Image (cartoon, rainbow, N blue to C red):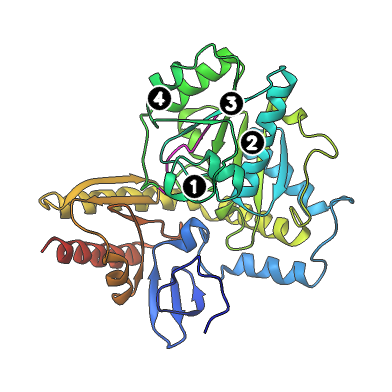
Amino acid sequence: MSHLMSNYLPLDVTFSSGKGCWLTDDKGQQYLDCLSGVGVVNLGHCHPTITKAIIEQASTLLHTSNWYHIENQELLADRLCSVANMDKVFFGNSGAEANEAAIKIARLHGQNKGVENPIILTANQSFHGRTMATLSATGNSKVQAGFAPLVSEFIHVDFNDIDAIKTFDGNSSVVAVMLEPIQGESGVIIPDDDYLNNVQSICNSNDWLLILDEVQTGIGRTGQFFAHQYNNITPDVMTLAKGLGNGIPIGACLTKGAASELLMPGTHGSTFGGNPLATKVSLSILDVFEGDNILDNVNKQSAYIHSQLSAALKDYSAVKEIRIKGLMIAIELNVDCSTLLQNALDDKILINITGNSIRMLPPLIIKKDEVDIMLEKVIKLINNASQ
């Protein structure tokens, strides 16, 4: 009998080791990891540069309080702000914590404007975390079920519907719009090319903060270091996690301009956030991106995957849509997907099923021969499901 709480339903496999894009279970069988721990292990398992950074830092200093200066934290803040064109950073331990910080910044922005009940607009079918504030921001009733009363005030509007946001133009109670550039948990929902630009324009004209949740899309996942860079914009607030630590817990809330001056001493904090180990690992990840042309590989493999899937699945009536941005991949089907997760595991490939979509987030270092294995197995999976 397990003493673990029952909030997870793990598949019947236990992994004992990993290298690159591959995991090995406790029976010695290998699996192609096309999920990266849900978009976390962007540089693959046991990357030598990251492993070296962990060992070196663990041998020196794991933790001090944020009551003191932490050199790695300050170095990481400088480098992240440089690559993101942002001004300041708060470090936490997860995407949910980063989004909590963003929500608190939006509240403070509203208080400074004299707004008594500040409203944050978020999107239907979004996912921002499972703390009380972030699940309230999340536009998914299944995530929220059982946890009422929720934190107010969040109003959910349809994603990729600029008119839904324009409805609030001039509303003095709205203080921010919080969006994922691409909705990941909902199945890689990609908005129109100019959607974020139009949202930012509305935010600017109303003095609302534009908050972009790049927890899943950030750190190279989409083929740019941050997904909003496709739009040539800079948000007021951006949140990161997942790929920022490659498996070591870390989250970051980055701010620009006036949003950078809202968190003052005593307003927010984290015991473990930005500790020497986590920030050393993130620094090593940035080193790998700079030295190994990771983004070039993401875009090269993405184009190949898109062309191969489009050609192979064009005559499948079971395939409703293929959605790809960088190495965020979804194949939406018209058939029941309930057995596909286990079927994929049986064929030694790790994927995700969200709604009626197969979702894949392979490591950004994946090579063409591994992509070919992934494509062969996924096409076979869809073929069997279609029969």
Earlier in the chain: of badge 2 and badge 4, it is 2
x, y percent for residue 12? 40, 78
Tell me the mark number nearer the camera, choosing from 3 and 2: 3
**Marks 4/3: CA–CA distance:** 24 Å
x, y percent for residue 296? 44, 49
**Marks 4/1: CA–CA distance:** 30 Å
Q: Badge 1 is on which residue?
A: 144
Residue 251 lies in magenta, yes or no?
A: no
Q: Quadrant of residue 279 in the image?
A: bottom right
Magenta highlight: main SS: loop
Residue type marked 3: Ile
Counting other residues with Cα less than 10 Å from the Cα at mark 4, is it few (<14), some (14-19), or many (20 or more)? few
Helix, strand or loop at mark 3: strand
Q: Badge 3 is on which residue?
A: 119
Q: Which residue is rendered at x = 44% and y = 16% of the image?
A: 167
Tell me if residue 118 comes above or below residue 21 in the rendering. above
Q: Badge 4 is on which residue?
A: 194
Helix, strand or loop at mark 2: helix
Tell me the mark number nearer the camera, choosing from 1 and 2: 1
Residue type marked 1: Gln
**Marks 3/2: CA–CA distance:** 10 Å
Residue type marked 2: Ile
Q: Badge 2 is on which residue?
A: 103
Tell me the mark number nearer the camera, choosing from 1 and 3: 1
**Marks 1/2: CA–CA distance:** 17 Å
Earlier in the chain: of badge 4 and badge 3, it is 3
Residue type marked 4: Asp
